[in-house]
Amino acid sequence: MDVLTEALTSMRTGRPASVRTLGSAPWGLRLPPVAGAGFHVVLSGECWLVPLEDAPQLAPVALAAGDVVFLRNGRGHILADDPATPAVEEQPEQYSAGPVLGTVTIGGDGPRTSLLCGNYHLDQARPHPLVGQLPEIIHLATGNGRHGELSAAVQLLKAELESPRIGSAGIVPALIDSLLLYILRAWLEDQAPATAQGWAAALGDRAVAPALSAIHQTPAAPWTVQSLAQRVGLSRAAFARRFTHLVGEPPMAYLTRWRMTTAATLLRETQAPLTTIAARTGYSSEYAFAKAFKREHGQAPGHYRRQTHAAPQH
């Protein structure tokens, strides 16, 4: 069971939004916060990502061709040829439609930088703890021979955007959709086993990783701390300590979280009866399920279903 894929799938609320940005020095573009997580791919040239004044703990980040940057909370920021260049907000006249993506063109007549900019629609109201533990900004360089798959995805995106051909309109959105997994896989694999903490360590831990996989694969199973500990060959107390330390919450709390996350997905995306959803998430009755769901989500399952079905889709 791929816990990373499932965690991200549980948070997604729509397809990514993206645009090409062409900046010729001097240029600076102020980007507002987005609902979800932001990302940028430097296709060619170089630039800076400059956090806004409300984030003094974050330093400007120099970006070069092939670099990918991921902003966990969709925080507002500035892209510019130089941190000192004044930034402006995007204006309608800077935008032009293209064969695959729209393009924003900004700046003067100096060296040009080409970027793919966008955001992933993620439910930040109830983030999975795996995502919640990520750094605010993840910066990955692919021009140094590392992150081969991510580098290949960047090069494919560059080719399709700079020389669109038949099929590009379907290929580019699929590549952008996959990019999120490539980004997080690369970051997780960058964490040295000896110093990794939290979920970066949990996904590679010989006891916690199989326990997480078991919970994700069969959330309806009557798991207990004892049965999970026996499954991975640890005592009950040792397993509970290890799981809680790495995941950030006790095993049964995470089991309940994942059951309710699974239930919310089924309520949003299917018309399955509540009795069926209750059974698929480990509850013997609709009443017990509804009580647990309301405690976790603050509303009854039926109301949640009606509300999410009525919400506009991205």
Image: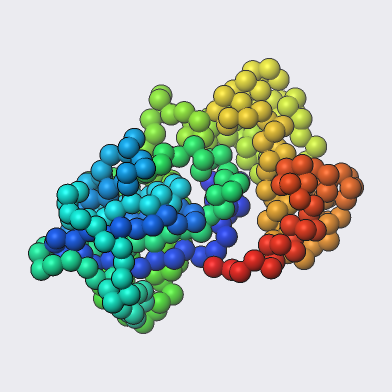
Query: Residue 97 lies in what quarter of the image?
Result: bottom left
What is the tally of numbered marks visible in this picture?
0
Q: Residue at x 68, y 17 (%)?
A: 237
Query: Residue 168 lies in what quarter of the image?
Result: bottom left
Residue 188 point in image, percent of width and height = 43, 39
Residue 222 visible in the snapshot: yes
Q: Nearer the viewer, residue 29 or 114?
A: 29
Query: Residue 113 lies in what quarter of the image?
Result: bottom left
Where 294 sits versus 269, above or below?
A: above
Residue 233 visible in the snapshot: no
Where 19 sits versus 214, above or below?
A: below
Residue 27 point in image, percent of width and height = 19, 61
Residue 29 point in image, percent of width and height = 27, 60
Describe residue 144's horizontal placement relative to residue 121 as left or right. Answer: left
Describe residue 9's horizontal placement relative to residue 91 as left or right. Answer: right
Q: Residue at x 66, y 23 (%)?
A: 240
Residue 198 point in image, percent of width and height = 50, 30
Quadrant containing the C terminus is bottom right
Where 155 sits versus 10, above or below?
A: below
Q: Residue at x 58, y 44 (%)?
A: 128
